[in-house]
Image (tube, coloured by chain):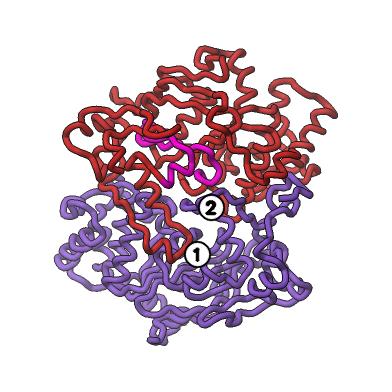
Amino acid sequence: MPSPILKVKDLQTQFLTHDGIVKAVDGVSFDLYPGESLGIVGESGSGKSITALSILRLVPDPGRVVSGKVLFHDKDLLQISDEEIREIRGRDIAMIFQDPQSSLNPVLRTGFQVDEAMLAHGKSKAEARSRTIELLNKVRIPAAASRYKDFPHQLSGGMRQRAMIAMGLANAPAILIADEPTTALDVTVQAQILELLTDLNRELGTAIVMITHNMGVVAGLCSRVIVMYAGQIVEQGPVDQIFENPQHPYTWSLLKSIPRVDALRHERLRSIEGIAPDLLHPPSGCRFHPRCPFRVEKCFTDEPLLQEVAPGQVAACWVTMERARKEMGADELVDIRPGAASGVHPGEII
Amino acid sequence: MAEAAVSGLPVRGPSSAKSLLRAENVVKHFPAGLGATVHAVDGVSFEIREGETLGLVGESGCGKSTLARLVTQLIPVTSGKIFFGDVELTKLRGEKLRQHRRQLQMIFQDPFASLDPRMTVGDIVAEPLDNFGVMRGRKRNERVQELLKIVGLNPNFNNRYPHEFSGGQRQRIGIARALALNPRLVVCDEAISALDVSIQAQIVNLLEDLQREFKLTYLFIAHDLSVVRHISDRVMVMYLGKIVEIADSTATYSDPKHPYTKALLSAIPVPDPKIQRGRRLVELTGEIPSPIKPPTGCRFHTRCPIARLPTPCAEVEPPLEEKGRDHLAACHFSQDV
């Protein structure tokens, strides 16, 4: 295996609020390998976006990266000067966001905004311009040369996201971080953008970090996945393995809670009891324990660390699904707990 | 509840069931300035059967939310008729219409915007009761507590305010409000789209349980076809103001008769990497045309992978007609899909 191009080590990002400190990212470590496509999944508030923003030092106030390392080619991005990080942003590591509408400047021509990404890193105007048209073609914007002059409002949502991707790719970065890039788009457009990202990853060898809440997106695009919950990584490993044999009860529940469009028969969804914890007062022990169907006594008090559960796969759980299956009948478990499924039929027998 | 609990699955509405709501050639146009017209809903006919869940999918701008508001008569039709049972809703005005609305309730998308932040949860849930003067005093409060319990909330939360609740809990409050008057039809307009995945499952399960217990009929609108397929007995697909297909939810997936349905299905990623990698995307060219100037003939012809141009697809509008048992589609070449 080649050595990683990005190493995130024990990242801690906190928000100082009126009510106290919110530990939005709490000890996150992972490696990113050249040319791979890594998914980071989690629900709102899990810390997935803040992790990405921390890498590029873009965390909004009152957030602060309080400790940890982000090593890019052995350079710690958290320690270098503002000037140096500005050089790296957009040139080596680029980022695209969820809402292409608000990420583009409405009063500048779309093509010029792609140019800017290159002008900022020392290309001449003429060079930038010809490359922009090439890029717009590459992201499959039809009639790229004439679209160059369009303002963002003249483009559709899907087009705008394509323009954002062109901007991200302008300097042929080693890493492209995509933060929910398809969430605001219709499904048919989402599918096109995902296909585009898959092709670009393959053709250009750009490593992609895909931040999403959609397990289907991960399944289609990524080779490895990180699952986050309440500011921490709970499971990480190869996509095929995690989808087939998740070891953390959260990952397992998440996969069982989504209806599949190819489902052959109607099966009741597995819902996850309760709600995500308040990060001002995270639960003791394992942060998932209040919602976990397989918790044991230890989970209330002791925090589990990530441990290898299969080759290349780690999970932070005292029990793990293997034991939950063997000893706790996880496979037969149907959602009947009062309040868990719906709170409507306590004592119902299914 | 007892017999429903035994089967453990939502009651599937039989195809012979009586129709509860019927729309006949319903049209809704909005003025768009400078004499232009938005053809939001452009001549749709369908029925919702007693006890079923009819799913409605389509991408942004297809007219699905407008249709929801027409069904509940929150906005008047431009032309066409909507019947609720034997009553023609589109003929009713004022107080008469208001009385009929008791049986037609709606659950909205945004649990943050659809609850008044200055009202207590108890007053929010009781508002329909107060509006219609159904219950007062202790009886009213008991009903509120009962409703909160039904949707899985602590009945003693009635004095709290919406901001004290999470998105999923707020959606439960919205559901309790919708159930207050014992409606027969509940229109869920993107009722779970704003929620996190694990919470979506809670609400979907809740809606299924409530349907069983109170014999509700749902019109379930969403852009996520996997959720719609899961919860619906039949699925209706809209494109640019028209219904392009209606079929039972199994046939929708296994045997789509409209190329748009097929494309929509292929675009939804399956959360299984081995299957997802092998799936082929039916790529649609171009973008959704403007509903101000919809294409001639079949509205889908500008993006259709199997269209024969110019004739008939760009010239003749295909009627929504029977293509199989209880399976309607509007396509000239449905046999090629």
Magenta segment includes B243: yes
The residue identified by callout 2 is A259
User: Residue A133: image x %, image y %?
Assistant: 18, 60
- Which corner quadrant of the image does residue B256 belong to? top left
According to the picture, the residue beneath numbered tag 1 turns out to be: A49
Chain in red, by letter, is: B
Q: Which chain is purple?
A: A
Which stretch appears magenta?
B228-254
Of callouts 1 and 2, which one flags the residue occurring earlier in the amino acid sequence?
1
Residue B145, placed above or below residue B31? below
Give, as a three-letter code, the residue at label 2: Pro
Q: Mark 1 lies on which chain?
A: A
User: In whole angstroms, how far apart are the C-alphas of marks 1 and 2?
Assistant: 25 Å
Q: Which amino acid, by three-letter code, is at mark 1?
A: Ser
* B26 in the magenta segment: no
Q: What element carries label 2?
A: loop
* Residue at 32% from the left image edge and 73% from the top image edge: A206
